[in-house]
């Protein structure tokens, strides 16, 4: 059942179970839901991550998709993935101060080197411009066992983890602050904060995008959020998409 309430400037649409919060958010966006509307569900039956990969969605974790309508060009909306990952980092750092909490390009949050959260930014044309559907999944009580990379949950690192409802409030407070910062100051402050929390910058990495495979020194992210990679032959290249891993792990 759809139950609405307000929190930290967001209108929250809560459901027991949906196929995907992103699909539900798209429906609401097409019906005219305004900026800062958010869908959350206790579970998803067909949750998805980047590149259409399935996202394990049992009850006990946090599943949300925010409808954001900043009235900006389409190319700017991918910056919201960095806004969201910073917000997740802020919220989790408040629970686990001093933990090894890092951001992995383009859209993962890692705790002790394992994936804690994934982010999916999609866009939808509406009224002559685009709105963003910002999907965020955070492992609170459960971590999937069979994944491409190691995964973890807050329960594995905190004896008494918060309830999903309480952590939602932490996340929304952080998202509201970071979204407001981005709207007011642009991407540069977000980019600098993201880089300060990033994993593997300055190290040799391998980036794979389908059959394409490149290796080199990870030098940071550019003003548009693309990865800056210094290839092994010395050339600098900007990478728009791909899966990254440390070269020594290959």
Image (cartoon, grey):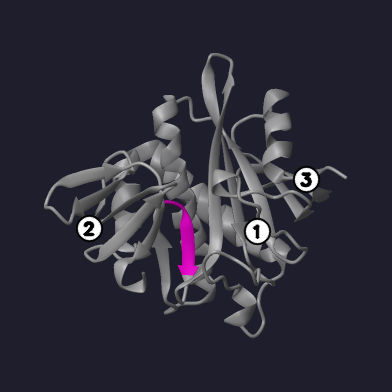
Q: Nearer the viewer, mark 3 or mark 1?
A: 3
Return the mark for residue 168: 1
Task: Choose the circle earlier in sequence order: 2 or 3.
Answer: 3
Looking at the image, the residue that sits furthest to the right is 1
Name the residue at 14% across, 47% down: 235
- State the separation of the CA atoms marked 2 and 3: 39 Å
- Taking the magenta stretch, the answer to whether it contains residue 163 is no
Secondary structure of residue under mark 2: strand
Q: Which residues are magenta?
A: 106-110
The residue closer to the viewer here, 77 or 182, is: 77
- State the separation of the CA atoms marked 3 and 1: 20 Å
Looking at the image, the residue that sits furthest to the front is 211
**Residue identified by numbered label 3:** 19
Image quadrant in which you'd find residue 138: bottom right
Q: Main secondary structure of the magenta part?
A: strand
Secondary structure of residue under mark 3: loop
Q: Is residue 104 above or below residue 82?
A: below
Secondary structure of residue under mark 1: helix
């Amino acid at each position: 059942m759809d139950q609405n309430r307000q929190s930290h400037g967001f209108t929250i649409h809560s459901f027991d179970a949906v196929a995907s919060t992103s699909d539900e958010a798209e429906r609401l966006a097409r019906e005219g839901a305004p900026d800062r509307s958010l869908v959350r569900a206790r579970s998803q039956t067909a949750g998805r991550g980047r590149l259409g990969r399935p996202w394990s969605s049992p009850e006990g974790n946090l599943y949300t998709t925010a409808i954001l309508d900043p009235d900006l060009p389409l190319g700017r909306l991918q910056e919201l993935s960095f806004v969201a990952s910073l917000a997740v980092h802020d919220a989790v750092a408040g629970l686990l101060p001093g933990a090894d909490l890092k951001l992995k390009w383009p859209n993962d949050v890692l705790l002790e080197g394992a994936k804690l959260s994934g982010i999916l930014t999609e866009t939808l044309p509406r009224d002559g411009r685009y709105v963003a559907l910002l999907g965020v999944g955070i492992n609170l009580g459960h971590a999937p066992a069979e994944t491409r990379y190691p995964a973890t949950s807050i329960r594995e690192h905190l004896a008494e983890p918060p309830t999903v409802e309480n952590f939602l409030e932490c996340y929304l407070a952080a998202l509201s602050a970071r979204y407001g910062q981005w709207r007011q100051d642009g991407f540069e402050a977000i980019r600098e904060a993201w880089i300060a929390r990033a994993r593997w910058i300055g190290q040799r990495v391998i980036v794979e995008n389908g059959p394409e495979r490149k290796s080199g020194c990870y030098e940071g992210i550019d003003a548009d959020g693309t990865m800056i990679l210094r290839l092994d032959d010395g050339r600098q290249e900007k990478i728009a998409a791909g899966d990254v891993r440390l070269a020594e792990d290959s």
